[in-house]
Amino acid sequence: MIKIFISHKQEDSYVASKIANELEMMGIPYYLDVLNFTTATNGKELTDHIKQNLNKCTDIIVVMSEVTKYSQWVPFEVGMAAQNDMPTATFLQENVSLPEFLAYWPRLKWPSDIKKYITTRHEVQREYASRNLFESAELRKSQTERFYSLLKKRL
């Protein structure tokens, strides 16, 4: 089961919503953060909120635009995801130059790339499903690397 965390800066909410709509049309669960003002201004509460919701997801798609570099929360979310070898991809708006810490992951550019992401993810999950019922950290890392390799070829 896949559940996507859509990481974005508030100014990129429109693009994040378009990604959410694509996922919804494919029947893929997702988490798209729409915070109230109280949560957004309380550092501890916001940190706990992000951790709790990110931990309920299996993957993260990061919306990248020129304003993302001013975000303190997007790098936090990406760091948490990377710590758990969570499959990660960026969704680029226009010709955004990626910060170094995001250059490694597959780069989605079009709504049709979301379908490629999900199709590839399911394919790799099926490939690894028969290997071990108890997913070890090493197996998860291997599966994530395989997913990146295949998806990058398809994009």
Image (cartoon, rainbow, N blue to C red):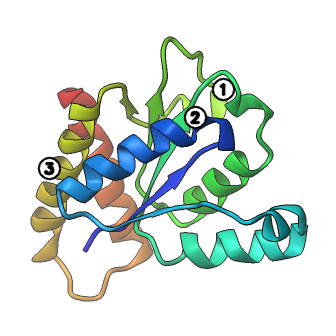
Q: Which label is found at residue 99?
A: 1
Residue 98 % position (x, y): 59, 23
Residue 47 % position (x, y): 78, 69
Q: CA distance from mark 3 to mark 1?
A: 27 Å
Asked if residue 25 is positioned above or below residue 70 in the image, the reply reads below
Whether residues under marks 1 and 2 lie with C-beta atoms below 8 angstroms apart, the answer is yes
Q: CA distance from mark 1 to mark 2?
A: 6 Å
Give the mark nearer the N terminus: 3 vs 1.
1
Q: CA distance from mark 2 to mark 3?
A: 22 Å
Task: Provide the residue designation for mark 3.
Answer: 119
Q: Residue at x 38, y 41 (%)?
A: 18
Task: Provide the residue designation for mark 2.
Answer: 102
Amino acid type shown at disc 1: Pro
Residue 137 % position (x, y): 44, 73
Q: Residue at x 52, y 43 (%)?
A: 62
Amino acid type shown at disc 3: Thr
Tell me if residue 123 can be seen.
yes
Comparing 15 with 150, the one in front is 15
Give the mark nearer the N terminus: 2 vs 3.
2
Q: Which label is found at residue 1?
A: none
- 55 left or right of 25 in image: right
Count neighbours of disc 3 (C-alpha within 10 A) and say few if under 14, some if 14 to 19, many if 20 or more. few
Q: Quadrant of the N terminus?
A: bottom left
Asked if residue 44 is positioned above or below residue 149 in the image, the reply reads below
Count neighbours of disc 1 (C-alpha within 10 A) and say few if under 14, some if 14 to 19, many if 20 or more. few
Badge 2 marks a residue whose secondary structure is helix
Amino acid type shown at disc 2: Leu
- 104 left or right of 2 in image: right
Q: Residue at x 57, y 56 (%)?
A: 82
